Each structure stands twice: as structure tokens, then as C-alpha cells.
Image (cartoon, rainbow, N blue to C red):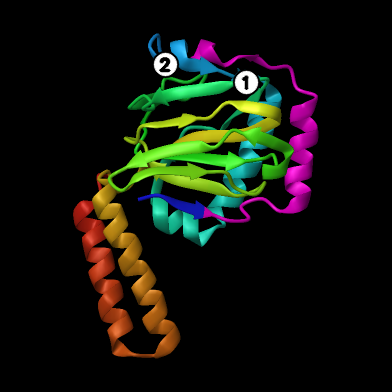
Amino acid sequence: MLLTIPDVLDAEQVRRCREALEKADWTDGAGTAGHIAARVKRNLQLPDQSPLNRQLGDLILDALAAHPRFIAAALPLKVVPPRFNRYEGGGTYGGHIDGAIQAVPGTPVRIRTDVSVTLFISEPGDYEGGELVIEDTYGSHAVKLPAGSAVVYPGTSLHHVRPVTRGVRLASFFWVQSLVREDSRRALLWELDGAVQRVNHDTPGSPAVAQLMGVYHNLLRDWSNT
């Protein structure tokens, strides 16, 4: 399931992130990739140990925690702290699938990457190229969102970032271990949750709402990996 989450950060939060990242000390992004992915990764990345990485990451996680669309789609159990990258001067990241297990820097914690998330910090007009292209059953999807918006997609997806030929593309990326491991089941729960909300809106107080919510939670109970 691939979907967008608009307005995760408001304009002021985006401005703060962009100003801080413009002054940041960046390192070669290939240093955090596996030996195969490193061959196709040409970007810059904020060091994991940077205090700015933690500060801005917490800002994003706090915003997402209050965003019902993200919670309903990802059903988060654990989250790898957000990281930040920078593409410019032809920077790109060739086709790859994210590692199945990611470490939380500075800890022994390992998290399964069921869901991948990219949050755009630069406005689309600030750079040329830089689309995140995600492959799924229905083909290729090129994603380039307004600053402050995010895309959520399965961690199993083959994806790449097209070369940035003008300007600078700033973004945050991270992974979620979901309560429900299988993407197809998360998609069904997402559809069911949306249907419950529509029924509740159209016929407030209907007994069907409680029944549907019961089905939702019983499926979640049955499919949860916790």
C-alpha cells in the first residue's frame, strides 16, 4: 500500500527544519548503505550522532504521532529514528530495497522495516528531478510532494531517487515496524477503518458502527505480531 500523508509539518516547522539543515555538516551518504547499495548511492546524509538529527527527528515523530492517517496506515509498533539526506549536483540513489532490519543508532535495538517513510522538506519547485520512484504491482510511481508532506510505502518495495539536476532536495527518511507485518493485511485494515469512519459520518449512532469496529479490532488482534 502506497499513500501520501499531507501536511505532517506546518509551514513554520518546515522553515525551521530547512534553515537548520542548510547550516548542517553533511557526510557521504554511501557510508550508511550496505556494500551493494553503496555502489548506487550518491547523496549526503546527516550523521546519526548529530544532535540536530535527534532534534529534528523528534519533531517529525511528534507530528506523526498526532496524525490519524499515518497511525491508521502504518499501525506503528517501533520506529527507527528519522534520518536526513541531501541531494544536489546530480545526486541520485539507484534502484534498491531497504535493509530488512535496521539498528537504532547507539543502542542494541534492531527493528524490522515493514514500512518505509519519506518526508519532503524542500518544495518541489526548489529543485529539478529528485522524484522518489516506487515500484509495485501496478507499475512505477514517481513521488515529489510539497514540503511537509510524506509518502508511506512497503519496505519490500524496489525504489530509487532520480538525479537532482538543479537546486537542493532535502528530505527525512525512516522505517516503521508495524503491528501487522503483512502489507496486504495492513491495506485491508486501512480500507475497513475508512469504511467505518464513513458509516459513522453518514449514519451517526448506527449499530453497524460498533459491529464494524468489532470486526476491525478482532482482525487486528488476530493479525498483530506482538
Determine crowd level at label 2: few under 14, some 14-19, many 20+ residues with C-alpha closer than 10 A: some
The span picked out in magenta is 5-32
Q: Is residue 36 above or below residue 156?
A: above
33 sits to left or right of 139: right
| Furthest-left residue in this view | 222
**Residue 123, position as x, y percentages in the image:** 70, 44
What type is the residue that disc 2 sits on? Ala
The label shown at residue 141 is: none
Residue shown at 27%/60% (left/top)? 188
Say if mark 2 contacts mark 1, CB within 8 Å: no
Quarter of the image for residue 131 reads: top right
What is the x, y in percent for residue 125? 71, 43
* Cα–Cα span, label 2 and label 1: 17 Å
Residue drawn at x 30%, y 80% is 210
Instruction: Identify the residue shown where x is 51% and y is 30%.
Output: 161
User: In the rendered view, would you say 50 is above or below 12?
Assistant: above
Give how far across and how far down residue 34 sits, in percent. Answer: 41, 13
Label number found at residue 90? 1
**First reached walking from the N terminus: tag 2 or tag 1:** 2
Q: Is residue 195 shown left or right of residue 225?
A: right
Q: Residues within 10 Å of mark 1 (few under 14, many from 20)?
A: some
Residue 37, numbered circle: 2
Which amino acid type is marked by label 1? Gly
Q: Could you tell whether 140 is left or right of 26 in the image?
A: left
Q: Is 214 drawn above or below residue 29 in the view shown?
A: below
Question: Residue 219 at x, y = what percent?
Answer: 22, 61
